[in-house]
Amino acid sequence: MNSLNAALLVNLLGFSVGVALYGLLAVMVARNRGEETPGNVRTLLFLTAGLGLVWNLGELFVSVQRDFAFVADWPFVTAAAYSALGFLPSVVVHSAQNESRGAFRLTYAAYALSTLAGVLHFYSAFSGSATPSILALGLLTAGALTLAAVLLFLNFRKRIEQRSVWAAALMVFAFSALHLSAEGEGNSWIVELAAHQSSLPLALVILYQNYRFAFADLFLKRAISLLLLSLTAFGLYIFAAAPLIRLHDDHPSDDVQAVGVLLAFWIGTALIYPLLHRLAVWMVDKAILRRVDYQELEAQVASDLERLDTADQVLDHITVLLTRVLTAGRADWSEEEASDERVLPDSAELVVQTAEAPVYLVRVGEFRGGRRLLSDETAMLRSVAVIAARRIDALRVIHERCDREFREQEFSRLAAEAHLTALRSQINPHFLFNALTTIGYLIQTSPDKAFATLLHLTKLLRGVLSTTREFSTLNDELKLIESYLDIERARFEERLRVEIDVPDRLREISLPSLILQPLVENAIKHGISENKNGGTVRITAETRAGDKIRLAVFDTGSSDTHSSSGTPGVGLSNVRGRLASHYGSGATLTLRSVKGGTEAEIILPAVWSAAVDRRMNLKGPERMER
């Protein structure tokens, strides 16, 4: 392919891509009227799209019709196309000066220059002179260079990045106008590309300056994807397909192999488009807009919120996060009964819409560096709000469940305490009744012993009634039992023999208060009083495997006397109930016949009192010898 054909191909491809890009911009501006885009920015975008479409459609039409030779020349179409091209530098100046109040003189001068150039183009078309007007292109060349210099001077305090972009775009246009004013055949395709497609750098500068419209990121991704695809197709044709086809010059024009090569390259271009689109997305997000990866950010937010336990922590976390990610100068939240979402280019109010009131309103704004919220930022904010709402809903459910479980546990505890209090209250009157019976008997038989026994009873009752704790030590329990046995000895005298075999190291075992006394009382009642010769009551304690303690009360009475009543006594039923309430299935009470008498056995978990636990912890390994 010679340089002339390559240049023509570049022009046709460039004009076609230009039509697609400017058409895409016009459609997106029209479809997104509901977005919160400033009116002056929308006007500039429509103006840019319209001028770009007129320039590219006009030149594409003129280039194509020449091959078909419909009409020798279309001067008015050419004049309209070049006039549209001449107005793009004015839009650049307008965009650059848009935020500077009182700096419209330069903008007016730029539009006046473009209008003059357009008038000259149409004058040439009406007069039959060469179109486009050489004088108009010369004026545009000089004007573009002048505008670039003035913009650099007036915006000296702005970032060098912005000033360089404006100046570079206007200088490219000046070069384009200079080339077009002396256009002729034989130019290389690179020169043709730079000359005829100078509108694209101008349009990109306008978009860069006014990227505040909400869909700018989407447009840039699609536009760059299209440009990369076009460049790939052009490069494959120029550097691969054309040389291969040239090897078949001696073959017929409809050579199957040549057509097959073209089809293969077309299919290959279609296959690599997803890769090109990902590259375009990366360029926009990382190189142009310098964004973080919002998908990774949302996943990280969801992970971070799982470790937080309150709604305040969740909302504080996302406000700090949004401040960092969006470089916001302000981010806060408030509790609302109901609210509506409001997203502007320079601020946003997002509703964290929980399942139940109250909802929360998160506000971000005052973005640094003139940053504006684009479509991906808006989508990210909404996703973060949804993630936060779901986490707050989950926390509310968890807290409600915990509160319910706490209330249920509290109710169960109160019910258990009431049950234990009722069981324990049975001990005092039951024991008192038996003690008074004994004293009544002694008053009739031995008044002196009755008085001494009454003193023992007073001491015993004082100890019983002052014991408000539900648990006591085995040592305290044995002291209480000894006071009780002193009373019973006054009644049975030598008929009652008592043996207590409890190691000192087990006397600090913690157990429910008054848990052994009913067993001793039961042994005396059924094992001693029913036997005219009396008998022996033996109290023992020993450790068992599995951190258990065995407490036993043995009497020499027969099991027949224990079961003659047919139903368990109040004392035994009370003991069983209290053991079940405290230990569940971890403690048992067994009444059985053994050699020489009857034995009541309690097996319960070994729990030492707090004082003993502290001593055992200091001694270390000795604790294991319990």
Image: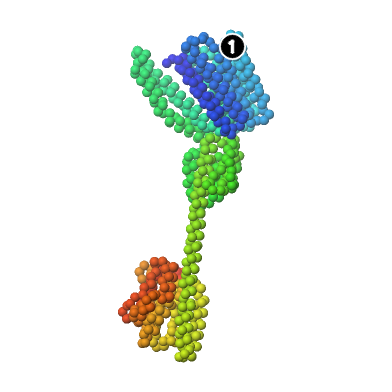
Q: Residue 588's spot in the image, x, y percent?
A: 38, 70
Residue at the extreme right? 102
Element at badge 1? helix
The residue sitting at 56% across, 46% down in the picture is 359
Q: What's the residue type where badge 1 is placed?
A: Ala
Q: Residue 557's spot in the image, x, y percent?
A: 35, 81
- Residue 196 visible? The answer is no
Residue at the extreme left? 595
Residue at the extreme front? 566
The residue sitting at 49% across, 39% down in the picture is 294
Q: Viewer-proximal residue, 300 or 470?
A: 470
Residue 503 picture quarter:
bottom left
The colour scheme used here is rainbow
In the image: residue 562, left or right of residue 484: left
What residue does disc 1 label? 125
The residue sitting at 64% across, 31% down in the picture is 99
Residue 490 picture quarter:
bottom left
Q: Is residue 206 positioned above or below 324 on the image?
A: above
- Residue 84 visible? The answer is yes
Q: Is residue 300 positioned above or below 283 on the image?
A: below
In the image: residue 551, left or right of residue 324: left
Q: Viewer-proximal residue, 560 or 431?
A: 560
Q: Quadrant of the C terminus?
A: bottom left
Q: Residue 615's spot in the image, x, y percent?
A: 45, 71
Q: How many marks?
A: 1
Q: Viewer-proximal residue, 346 or 110?
A: 346
Q: Residue 468's spot in the image, x, y percent?
A: 51, 73
Circle 1: is it few (<14), some (14-19), or many (20+) Cα within 10 Å? many
The residue sitting at 46% across, 72% down in the picture is 423
Residue 172 picture quarter:
top right
